[in-house]
Image (tube, rainbow, N blue to C red):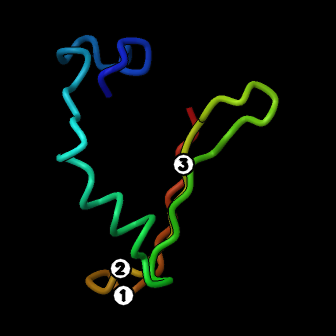
């Protein structure tokens, strides 16, 4: 979120956003390290360019009482 090209769509609202590791480390640990098979999260890689192009997530939302899938592709 600190990369100007990535955040170009946000230019009208201020551009880049500071996002230091301490702000996301707890989320990262919960979704990728200690997920206990309750969450699935992966980055999408374009194998030709070797660039990350999006992300995919799948999890059960107890409040909504349903499985939710998130797919974001740049």
Depth-wise, is mark 2 or mark 3 nearer the camera?
Answer: 3
Tell which residue pokes out farthest to the right in this image: 48
Q: Dot 1, crowdedness within 10 Å: few (<14), some or many (≥20)? A: few
Q: How many marks?
A: 3
Which one is nearer the viewer's eye here, 50 or 15? 50
Q: Is residue 22 left or right of residue 52?
A: left
Residue position marked by numbered label 2 in the rendering: 61
Q: Nearer the viewer, mark 3 or mark 1?
A: 3
Up the image or down, 5 lies above or below 1; here it is above
Distance from disc 2 to disc 3, alpha carbons, whole Å, reads 18 Å
Secondary structure found at label 1: loop
Instruction: Report if the CB atoms under discs 2 and 1 are less than 8 Å apart.
Output: yes
Front-lying residue, 66 or 8: 8
Q: Residue at x 39, y 75 (%)?
A: 34
Quadrant holding the C terminus:
top right
Split into 4 quadrants, where in the image is the N terminus?
Answer: top left
- From the image, tell me which residue sits under label 3: 55
- Judge from the rendering whether residue 29 lies leftward or rightward of residue 5; answer left or right: left
Q: Is residue 15 above or below residue 74?
A: above
The answer to which of 31 and 10 lies nearer the viewer is: 31
What's the mark number on residue 65? 1
Crowding at mark 3 (Cα within 10 Å: few <14, some 14-19, many 20+): some
Mark 2 or 1: the one toward you: 2
42 relative to 46, above or below: below
Q: Secondary structure at mark 2?
A: strand
Mark sitting earlier along the chain (2/3): 3
Question: Circle 3 — which element?
Answer: strand
| Left or right side of 8 for 43 | right
């Amino acid at each position: 979120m600190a990369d100007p090209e990535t955040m170009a769509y946000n230019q009208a609202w201020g551009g880049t956003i500071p996002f230091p590791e301490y702000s996301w480390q707890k989320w990262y640990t919960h979704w990728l390290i200690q997920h206990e098979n309750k969450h699935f999260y992966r980055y999408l890689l374009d194998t030709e360019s070797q660039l990350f192009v999006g992300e995919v997530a799948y999890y059960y939302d107890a409040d909504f009482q349903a499985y939710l899938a998130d797919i974001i592709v740049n």
